[in-house]
Amino acid sequence: MTAAPLDAARDALIALQGQLIAMPAAQNAALAERAGEMEERLARLERAASRNSGNSSLPPSMDDQPGRTSPPCPERGKGKRRNPGKQPGAPGSHLAWREDPDRTVPHFPRGACVCGTDLAASADLGVAAPV
């Protein structure tokens, strides 16, 4: 007769141990699923971050965004190398500095308008160009 209460207590303990063992297994399954989702997300983000104007349809202005890798510089011709620019000895040109950069010259239209009116009588709109 004393064996029945011990058997019931043992059976309850075994059932409780079974529940305790099942809890980490369920947590492990949930964590494994979450890890899989995170791996997929990481792969998608790495693929998006590696796109640039050289390997996708993105414009070159997007290459300098944070996290973007710029495409490698293309090699200029594999054969004979030439320096860019003008021919050696050719005269150069530049826009010279002015003594008075604030001086302006008014510009007035000449001729006739599309409607046939003479433009010499038109109103002065204050348009001027630097000289």
Image: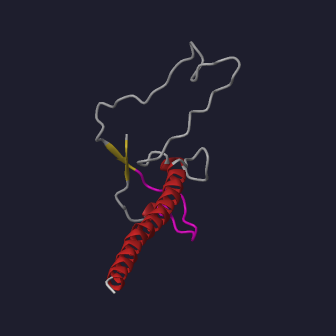
Quarter of the figure with the C terminus: top left
- Residue in front for this viewpoint, 14 or 123: 14
Q: Which residue is most to the bottom? A: 1
Expressed as whole percent of the image width and height from the top left, the position of residue 11 reads 39, 79
- Residue in front for this viewpoint, 85 or 19: 19
Quarter of the figure with the N terminus: bottom left
Horizontal side of 38 relative to 100 (left or right) equals right
Q: Would residue 110 be visible to someone looking at this image?
A: no
- Magenta-drawn stretch contains 76: no
Q: Would residue 8 be visible to someone looking at this image?
A: yes
Magenta-colored span: 107-119
For the point 47% across and 46% down, the residue is 68
Assign the magenta stretch its main secondary structure: loop
Expressed as whole percent of the image width and height from the top left, the position of residue 98 reads 33, 31
For the point 35% across and 29% down, the residue is 97
Horizontal side of 102 relative to 122 (left or right) equals left
Expressed as whole percent of the image width and height from the top left, the position of residue 9 reads 33, 80
- Magenta-drawn stretch contains 113: yes
- Residue in front for this viewpoint, 38 or 117: 38
Snapshot quadrant of residue 72: top right
